[in-house]
Image (cartoon, grey):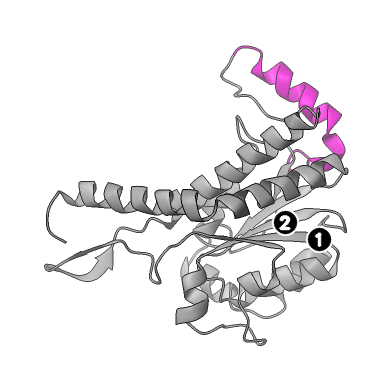
Amino acid sequence: MSDGTPADLFFDAAIGLLQRVREEEAEAITAAGTLLADTVAAGGRLFAFGAGHSSLAAQDVVYRAGGLALMNLLAVPGVVGVDVTPATLGSALERVDGLASAVLDSSPLRAGDALVIISLSGRNALPVEMALNARALGVRVIGVTSVAYATETSSRHSSGTFLRDHCDIVLDSKIAVGDAELTLDTIPAPFAPASTVVTSALMQAVMATTAATLADRGIEPPLLRSGNVDGGHDWNGRVMTEYGDRIFYRH
């Protein structure tokens, strides 16, 4: 690391990754947005899942002003974020065989639904098993992951496979193994992760594509408005009433 402040260098790195994703994943983003639009149009439900920090990008598209009201969070106790104590337990649970099966068995997911699974490494048992089992149920799966991990690390699932191997569509975040963009001679470890910035942007690009695709078909996309905008509560109440049977976070 040489010229520029650490802040400048991080912004440069993040912008570079966003530009790569914009250019290299454009086709996959369109495909993912179309798949979600197809699901909505056919009466299916939408779900997003992420473990640990990957959950941040999943939560960002659920009950979101300007977002699709139909996107629901598929929650796995102990792994959604870092609120479990100790935080290391969340990492351990991601490696437990059978946890995804138990979650799916008790979830509302059914054939015809769509599930976005976000996992930076895509190597742990939980996201791999969740994708495998969801597809077996007839659920369409979109994976958001760093494909680099599948070539530079080994799987922690008994099958030896990665999340990317069990998806209908894969979005590659381009994040390098280790998720740290900067190095400095005076600091012994790489630092400044960018995966949340990039993955959240990928998710919002897909959501925007979904909304526009529905509108192109003459279907009003079920979008939420900010409760801090005049009329927002009434708007959201109408959307939630109309689509109440496909919204699970309000029950």
Amino acid under disc 1: Val
**Residue 28 drawn at (x, y percent):** 61, 55
**Residue 216 drawn at (x, y percent):** 74, 31
Local packing at callout 2 (Cα closer than 10 Å; few below 14, some 14-19, many 20+) is many
Which disc, if any, is residue 139? 1
Toward the viewer: 25 or 194?
Answer: 25
Magenta-drawn segment = 230-251
Toward the viewer: 109 or 138?
Answer: 138
Marks 1 and 2 in Cβ contact (< 8 Å) = yes
Does the rendering let one see residue 53?
Answer: yes
Q: Is residue 172 left or right of residue 28?
A: left
Q: In terms of secondary structure, what is the magenta stretch mainly?
A: helix
Q: Tell whether position 141 is magenta.
A: no
Residue under circle 2? 115
**Residue 108 drawn at (x, y percent):** 83, 55
Asked if 39 appears above or below 132 in the picture, the reply is: above
Which disc, if any, is residue 207? none
Query: Which quadrant is the N terminus positioned in?
Result: bottom left
Q: Is residue 96 left or right of residue 146?
A: right
Number of numbered callouts drawn: 2
What residue is rendered at 69% in x and 66% in y?
Answer: 167
Amino acid under disc 2: Leu
Toward the viewer: 99 or 13?
Answer: 13
> How far apart are the alpha carbons under marks 1 and 2?
7 Å
What residue is rendered at 56% in x and 42% in y?
Answer: 204
Q: Is residue 194 left or right of residue 224?
A: left
**Residue 126 drawn at (x, y percent):** 64, 72
Disc 2 element: strand
